Image (cartoon, grey):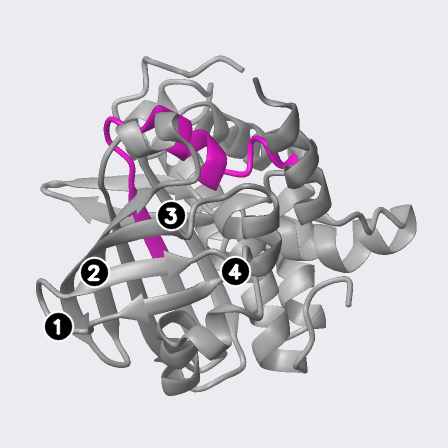
Amino acid sequence: MHGVNDDDRVFKALADPTRRFLLDLLFTRDGRTLTELESELEMTRFGVMKHLRVLEDAGLVVARRKGREKLHFLNPVPIRLIHDRWIDKYTERHVSALAELKTELEGTP
Amino acid sequence: MTINTESSVTTQINRVYIRATPEAIWDAITKPEWTAKYGYGGGVEFDLRPGGAFRVHASEEFLAAGAPEIVVDGEVIEADPPRKLVQTWRMLMDPELASEGYTRLTHEIEPTDHGTKLTVIHELEGAPRLAALVAGKHEAEGAGGGWSWVLSDLKSVLETGERLGA
């Protein structure tokens, strides 16, 4: 379940336009019910559930109960981990966040 | 930056699996020698009982950048080591953020077959500026990447002993 396998799940989950669309929906407005998500797609409820399951298994979506409703939240951490592991490595953007924060704070009137 | 005012759900959930014991993760969240090592740094001060005080002392870099001595404060609501920590949380980095008041933060720690699951639930009702900050929306300006960045860094520190990019 670890290392390579975790990344595999995330890449596989992202390798589908419907699932990327679902993530974009949650990015725009987080914490939606299945019914709300289904209304944005021309797909059966069952189909949307299947895609959500793949996203949940990859850790990209976290479902939580709120009263009688089950809300779906985007979990950005797996994408962050891939970013930190793969993207940073090849873009060499190792800047100091604090140095930039200092500049920003000092530049704020 | 525009804030989506349509949104009725203001809670943010970040979850990570870490190859470490629940106790080690609990310590990494509640002990200053650990909190100085990842994310925004700075040392926490926790009185781990209901009503107990919570403070984050600014790191030297933050102080040098003009941050106040206490950058975050709050109060413990529930402390159940090493499983659950519920608290209030107010950012004091600047007056606008401070004026949004206290938000509610929950850490849930749960062992699973594939590592310990850490879920951070931040309820950000009435705090749109803080919500943008902890979602990492100001990262390009150097304000850090919010919770996802903090948790990615915490995972790195606990699993490898080193920070990201170290």
Q: Are marks 3 and 2 on the same chain?
A: yes
Residue on which the image places disc 2: B86
State the residue at coordinates (76%, 60%): A85
Residue on which the image places disc 4: B151
Q: Quadrant of the N terminus of chain B?
A: top right
State the residue at coordinates (25%, 23%): B8
| Residue A60 showing in the rendered view | no
Q: Could you tell me how far apart the alpha carbons at marks 2 and 1 are, in whole angstroms?
A: 10 Å
Side of A25 where A72 appears, left or right: left
Name which residue type carries label 3. Ile
- Asked if the stretch drawn in magenta spans residue B122, the answer is yes
Q: Secondary structure at mark 3?
A: strand
In-front residue for pair B162/B70: B70
Location of residue B157 by image quarter: bottom right
In-front residue for pair A38/B17: B17
Residue on which the image places disc 3: B13
2 or 4: tag closer to the N-terminus: 2
